[in-house]
Structure formats: C-alpha cells, structure tokens
Amino acid sequence: MKELIQRQMFDYLLTNGVKNFVGVPDSTFKYFLSHGLKKNKIIISTREEEAIGIAAGMVLSKQTSLVFMQNAGFANSISTISSLIQLYEIPLIFLIGWRGYLKDDAPEHYKIGKIQPQLIKSLGLSFKIVSESNWKKHCKWALQNIRKDIPCALIIRRLS
Amino acid sequence: MIRREAIKLASRIIGNAHIISANGYISRDLFETDDKETNFYMLGSMGLASSIGLGIALSNPKFRVFVFDGDGNILMNLGSLTTIGILSPKNLIHIIFDNNSHESTGGQPTHTRKVNIGRIAQTNNYRVFQTSTKSGLTKILTKTKTLSGPIMIVIKIKKSKYISKRVEIEPKLIRKRFCGTLEKKARY
C-alpha cells in the first residue's frame, strides 16, 4: 500500500475515534506506523499477545483501540484471542500484515501465509482484506463492528 | 503465610481499587475470599494480567490499579516489565504472589526459586518491595499509598493444600460489572 494511503488510513481511524494503537511493527504498514509515531499515538509492545492485553485494558476503560501485528504474530496470539478477547467479548480492531501472500516472500512466511485465511476463519474472527481502493469502506466496517462490541480484523497484503 | 491469606489481606486493604487477577489459583482465591465488582478475574490468557493492568492504568491516570500476579504468570510475559518500565505508569501496583512454583498444575518448580524477580523489575524502573509476613504486607501497602509507581510488591508465600472454588461468574458478566465500576469511578 502506498505511503500516502497508509497515512490517510491512520488519520481516518484516529479522527473516527480510535484512541490507542498498540502492537508489534510490520513492514507491510510501516508508513501507517511512522505517521502514528510522529503523532505520538503508537505504543510498541514486546510481543503481540502483550499488545492484545494492553489494548484489552484500554477497551475495558471505554477507549477504542487497535492492535497491529504481522500474521506470524497473529498465529502466536490465537490462544489469547480466544481466551481473552472472544471469551469476554472485548471489541478490538486487529490490523494484520499478511506476509507470505506472494510465493516469493521470505521462506519463514510461507506456511502461515498460506493458511492465513483458514486460520482467521476457523477462529471465527470476521475480517476484510484492505486495498488502496477499498480501505475507507473497510475501516468504516471495522468501526461499526466495534460499536456493536464485535472484535474484527483488517488485513493488509504484502504485494511486493 | 499461604497465598489465600495474602490475597485476602491485600484485597481487604486495597478496598475498592481495581484489581486484575491472574488465572489459576490467584483468581480463585480472590473470588472466594473477597469477591468485588472491581475485580477482573482473568480466566485464560496466562501471563497477561500485568498487560491488562497496564492498559487500564494508562487509560485511568487518576486512580490506582492493582495487578495480582503469580511467579509463573509473570515469567511467561517478562517483556511486560520492560514495557511497563518504558511507559512508567505512576498508578500501577504490581503484586507478585511468589511460591516458586506452578501450584495449580501440580507444584512444578518455576525459575524464581533461583532468580530474583524483584531485581529484574528494579532494572525496569520499578520501585520494589518484598515481604513474607502479614505485618510486612500491611506496612508496605500502607506506605505505597503515597508513592508513585510503577511499584512491585513481591510476597513470598508458602504452598498449601487448600484449593479455592472456581470463579462462578460468567466471563461476560465479569467484564460488565468491572467496566461499570471503572466508568463510575472515572466520572467522579
């Protein structure tokens, strides 16, 4: 995704009520993060599950929050998503970088990249794949879910 | 002092401040000895009580937030200490009930039998206290009322055969009542 679109997406989420952005960085959305860091709105955690815990605490305090991570970290977090976020119905937005979407990505991303859609579907976490043309529509969709107390995910593919 | 006694005493002194309690026997003891709407019983997500507590402390800087953690729990999320150290919330009090073991899975040993968790916390910008007695715990909790955090209190406890009942409240209700008290408190 282009730098300008990533920055617009961050600003859109921020101005539409997302107060906290917590997580582990991924190159797929590096411009999203650098823009947020400049505005002092990003908290970097040591692991993805830690980020989910911190953001859960913020959501319990009635602050809309987003957790960002690479899909490798999403795979690490499955137990936490089911036993904390889904068990207590804590509405969080996940922003996930989809590495291994293309076959020529680094070899460590191949397996999880291949099963990413099945992985998230079997968890029962609703998601949308975000592109340069549909990002605003899907961000709106995510914010609507949060208002209904439903956790959900936005996925950004690595296309180059 | 066994964990159940330490948890009951700490919870009574803390009163109506918010507590995030770790999964396993810690939440069960807290539920059985001093159930309050301000308790958030973390049933799964082992290791994350301190992270949830951090999120709540950052979002509510005007009041104090307590984490009731275990040695096995914090060892699973040591990175949390560095994140708490960097963000340094003044209102976070992190209590470790340390019996050097994974008691709820059969008493297997944890690393705190030879590694000092308080010293690790100190290098992460925590103010650290340690005790193994009821009078020591009472003194520390009274003293820390006027100190700014992050604060860690390590309570060395003895193993016990007593097992508290499971938390009998639905997770969604735990969340609802806890959020209700947070909202109320934030308003005043």
Image (cartoon, coloured by chain):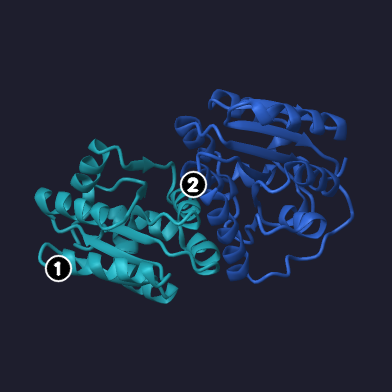
Q: CA distance from mark 1 to mark 2?
A: 31 Å
Is residue B116 something that shows in the picture? Answer: no
Is residue B42 something that shows in the picture? Answer: yes
Residue A72 at x, y percent in the picture: 36, 55
Locate the C terminus of chain A by quadrant.
Answer: bottom left
- The amino acid at mark 2 is Gly
The correct choice, above or below, for B1 with respect to B183 in the image is above
Q: Which chain is blue?
A: B
Residue displayed at 33% across by 42% down: A42
Q: Check disc 1 and report its element: helix, strand or loop.
A: loop
Residue displayed at 54% across by 25% down: B125
Number of the label disc, if any, that sits on residue A134: 1
Q: Check disc 2 and report its element: helix, strand or loop.
A: helix
Q: Is residue A15 left or right of residue A89?
A: left
Q: Is residue B129 left or right of residue A71?
A: right
> Would you identify the image quadrant in which residue B177 lies?
bottom right
Residue A34 at x, y percent in the picture: 22, 40
Q: Which chain is cyan?
A: A
> Would you identify the image quadrant in which residue A44 lies?
top left
Q: Which of the pair A121/B4 is nearer the observer? A: B4
Q: Are labels 1 and 2 on one chain?
A: no
Residue A71 at x, y percent in the picture: 33, 58
The chain holding disc 2 is B
- The amino acid at mark 1 is Asn
Front disc: 1 or 2:
2
Residue displayed at 57% across by 31% down: B150
Graded by Cα atoms within 10 Å as few (under 14), some (14 to 19) or many (20 or more), the crowding at tag 2 reads: many
Q: Which residue is mark 2?
A: B55
